[in-house]
């Protein structure tokens, strides 16, 4: 009987652990040194993660990475869908030791023959109507919504803990097209982004963009004016439902 009960209990523990890690995190230490000249923000939601890094002061974009993650006890695994620091690692899975205490996690592993130790502090766990990992699946043009099926080339947008990050990439060719992120609010049908990093144009950091939003049949309908002044109407679907079904 004990053996029969062990499997579901471990599975349940892994699910609870994965849920408690959901939200937004900031790296405070790397390999024993305090991180003061760079900012790394990492978002976890719905079994997916993404991070963006920039220089503090200049806002120069440094890089980004992300993909699926899993937790089983103290073992934490990441499978990369995109990784600007070393694109050849896209598609690989790395196992780490995870030590979580309240609002701090310590991730450690031996990577490429070197010991890696990262300390992350939680900076947000707020949830709202848009808290999810999304993938772009449609756009309205001439009054009609035109659908697209996310494949190797896709655009993902992850929102959790009051932070957002979008990423355009091709996991098959390992090509990275761009990313941006920051803080956001989603209240009373109004979605507002405050940009804190942007891979394509550092000068956009500090800008705020407001849009209308509505969740219809589980999909995020996002409309308003783009940063260039053009009208947009986008449809975003839950990543697990829209992408994995097409793998």
Image (cartoon, rainbow, N blue to C red):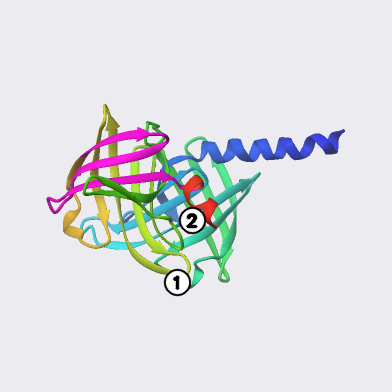
Label 2 CA crowd tier, 10 Å (few <14, some 14–19, many 20+): many
Is residue 208 positioned above or below 52 on the image?
above
223 part of magenta stretch? yes
In the figure, is residue 111 to the left or right of 64? right
| Residue range (magenta) | 211-239
Foreground label between 1 and 2: 1
Where does residue 123 sit, x and y in percent of width and height? 38, 39
| Residue toward you, 179 or 149 | 149
Under tag 2, what secondary structure?
strand
Instruction: Identify the residue under disc 2.
Output: 67
Q: Earlier in the sequence, mark 1 or mark 2?
A: 2
Task: Using the image, tell me which numbered label, if any, was put on residue 173.
Answer: 1
Label 1 CA crowd tier, 10 Å (few <14, some 14–19, many 20+): few
Residue 33 placement: quadrant: bottom left
Look at 58% across and 71% down and name the residue there: 113
- SS assignment for the magenta stretch, majority: strand
Look at 68% across and 40% down and name the residue there: 11
Where does residue 133 sit, x and y in percent of width and height? 43, 45
Where does residue 171 sit, x and y in percent of width and height? 46, 65
Where does residue 88 sit, x and y in percent of width and height? 48, 73
Look at 14% across and 51% down and name the residue there: 230
Is residue 164 positioned above or below 87 on the image?
above
What is the spatial separation of the Cα atoms under label 1 and label 2, in whole angstroms? 15 Å
| Residue toward you, 60 or 183 | 183
Look at 47% across and 37% down and name the residue there: 103
Residue 221 placement: quadrant: top left
Is residue 119 positioned above or below 11 on the image?
below
């Amino acid at each position: 009987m004990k053996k029969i009960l062990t499997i579901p209990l471990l599975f349940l523990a892994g699910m609870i652990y994965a849920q408690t890690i959901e939200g937004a995190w900031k790296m405070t230490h790397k390999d024993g040194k305090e991180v003061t000249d760079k900012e790394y923000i990492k978002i976890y939601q719905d079994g997916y993660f993404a991070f963006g890094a920039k220089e503090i002061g200049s806002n120069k974009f440094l890089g980004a990475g992300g993909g699926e993650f899993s937790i089983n006890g103290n073992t934490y695994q990441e499978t990369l869908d995109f990784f600007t620091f070393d694109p050849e690692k896209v598609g690989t899975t790395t196992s780490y030791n995870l030590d979580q205490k309240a609002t701090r996690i310590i991730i450690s592993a031996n990577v490429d023959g070197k010991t890696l130790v990262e300390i992350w502090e939680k900076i947000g766990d707020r949830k709202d109507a848009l808290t999810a990992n999304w993938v772009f699946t449609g756009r309205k043009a001439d009054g009609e919504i035109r659908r697209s099926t996310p494949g190797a080339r896709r655009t993902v947008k992850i929102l959790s803990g009051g932070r957002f990050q979008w990423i355009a990439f091709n996991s098959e060719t390992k090509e990275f097209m761009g990313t941006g992120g920051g803080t956001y609010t989603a209240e009373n049908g109004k979605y507002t982004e405050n940009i804190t990093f942007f891979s394509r144009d550092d000068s956009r950091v500090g800008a705020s963009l407001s849009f209308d939003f509505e969740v219809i049949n589980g999909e995020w309908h996002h409309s308003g004016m783009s940063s260039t002044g053009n009208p947009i109407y986008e449809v975003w679907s839950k990543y697990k439902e829209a992408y994995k079904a097409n793998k």
